């Protein structure tokens, strides 16, 4: 085993890089991508500098793996931007400020209102069926309302 490691060729590094990239396809979440690229880069360097020793090969592999991963991490963080539609995935946030009719009487602070072709649970002051209420907030899937 030690003899094999002492005489790694550029083909061994390219094969390792290929194996790591293939494993990445099966869902490693990006972890093996950068190691695969680093291994392929060490293979290219080994091709260009044949007498490169095992210690330098392993050091290059470690440094390149870390450098490529950190580069990509910084690039991903710098490209993240705030959404121009902050309420996009918050179902019900578009209902705040609108007025609806009570579908099931609000008793002890809980009831239901008719919204389009659906019914939403609400919390607010007691109101009879047919009363008008305005949505003032949202707590998960429950709307907070006030009487109009």
Image: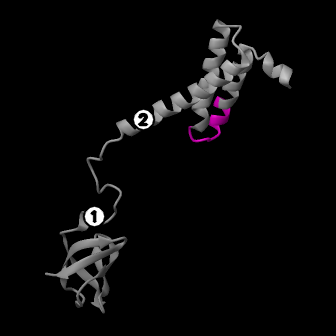
Specify few, some or many for label 2: CA neighbours under 10 Å numbering under 14, 14-19, or 20 or more.
Answer: few
Residue 28 rendering spot, x and y as whole percentages: 62, 41
Compared to 7, does 64 lie above or below?
below
Residue 131 rendering spot, x and y as whole percentages: 19, 85
Residue at left 24%, top 90%?
A: 126
Q: Secondary structure at mark 1?
A: helix
The image's mark for residue 74 is: 2
Residue at left 73%, top 15%?
A: 11
Q: Earlier in the sequence, mark 2 or mark 1?
A: 2
Location of the C terminus (image quadrant): bottom left
Residue 82 rendering spot, x and y as whole percentages: 30, 46
- Residue stretch in magenta: 21-30
Q: Nearer the viewer, residue 128 or 7?
A: 7
**Is 135 left, or right, of 2 in this rendering?**
left
**Is 126 left, or right, of 140 in this rendering?**
left
What residue is disc 1 on? 93
């Amino acid at each position: 085993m030690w003899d094999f490691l002492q005489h790694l060729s550029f083909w061994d590094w390219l094969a390792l890089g290929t194996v790591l990239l293939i494993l990445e396809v099966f869902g490693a979440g990006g972890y093996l991508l950068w190691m695969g690229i680093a291994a392929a880069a060490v293979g290219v360097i080994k091709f260009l500098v044949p007498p490169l020793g095992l210690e330098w090969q392993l050091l290059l592999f470690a440094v390149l793996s870390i450098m490529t991963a950190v580069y990509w991490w910084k690039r991903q963080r710098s490209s993240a931007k705030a959404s121009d539609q902050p309420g996009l995935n918050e179902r019900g946030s578009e209902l705040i400020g609108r007025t609806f009719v009570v579908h099931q009487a609000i008793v002890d602070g809980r009831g239901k209102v008719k919204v389009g072709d659906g019914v939403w649970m609400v919390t607010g002051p007691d109101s009879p069926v047919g009363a008008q209420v305005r949505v003032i907030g949202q707590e998960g899937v429950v709307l907070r309302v006030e009487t109009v």
